[in-house]
Amino acid sequence: MSIAENLLPEFDQEMANTRRLLAVVPAADAGWRPHPKSYTLGDLAAHIATIPVWCRYTLQQDELDLGSPDTATIPRVKFATGAELLEQFDRHVQEARASLAAASDGDMGKPWTLRNGATAVFSLPRAAVLRGFVLSHMIHHRGQLTVYLRLRDVPLPAIYGRTADSG
């Protein structure tokens, strides 16, 4: 079984879990933030909806320079409505999954570098980038989003099992 074939079930599960959580984000609370240094609820949800795009960038190029004007082409989701957020998330997930499914083991072993101008933030094999920078990054922010939602008294859907709200 290839690396991609091993990652796809985890990818599918985490994207489904994320979608369930994004589906309950209340548009009325999009501007709320728990602390002045924190994302707003809408900005956090939008960031999470964008993270699957990084899968495609990881697999289709050798590096990404956040300090380059070219990064202006990276899709940036803005929170408007829950339906629009889910539509954009679904599109990003579909593109990411197609890129992942097409990746060979050779592709997965190639190094990928994240830069900020002349500074290399990290350089890792693509498989490690997908697990850490894409999936774990999304899971991290998804955890933050559950706290935001709990603080807004939004019932939480099941992620890895039942929640106090799901029975």
Image (tube, rainbow, N blue to C red):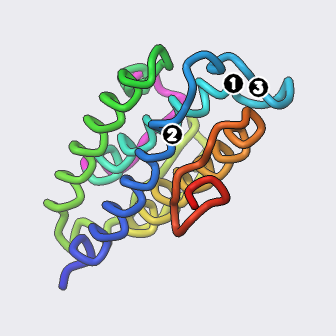
Ranked by sequence position, the earlier of labels 2 and 1 is 1
Q: Residue at x 50, y 48 (%)?
A: 114
In the image shown, does 1 or 60 lie closer to the viewer? 1
Q: Nearer the viewer, residue 82 or 164?
A: 164
Q: Amino acid at mark 1?
A: Thr
Residue where numbered disc 2 is placed: 48
| The quadrant where residue 76 appears | top left
Name which residue lies at 29% across and 45% down.
93
Q: Earlier in the sequence, mark 3 or mark 2?
A: 3
Q: Quadrant of residue 5?
A: bottom left
Give the percent coordinates (x, y) of residue 163. Answer: 62, 60
Quadrant containing the N terminus is bottom left
Q: CA distance from mark 3 to mark 1?
A: 4 Å
* Badge number at residue 40: 1
Secondary structure, mark 2, is helix
Q: Quadrant of the C terminus?
A: bottom right
* Residue in the image at 19% along x and 63% along y: 103
Q: Could you tell me if the residues under marks 3 and 1 are in contact, i.e. CB atoms within 8 Å?
A: yes
Q: Nearer the viewer, residue 160 or 7?
A: 160
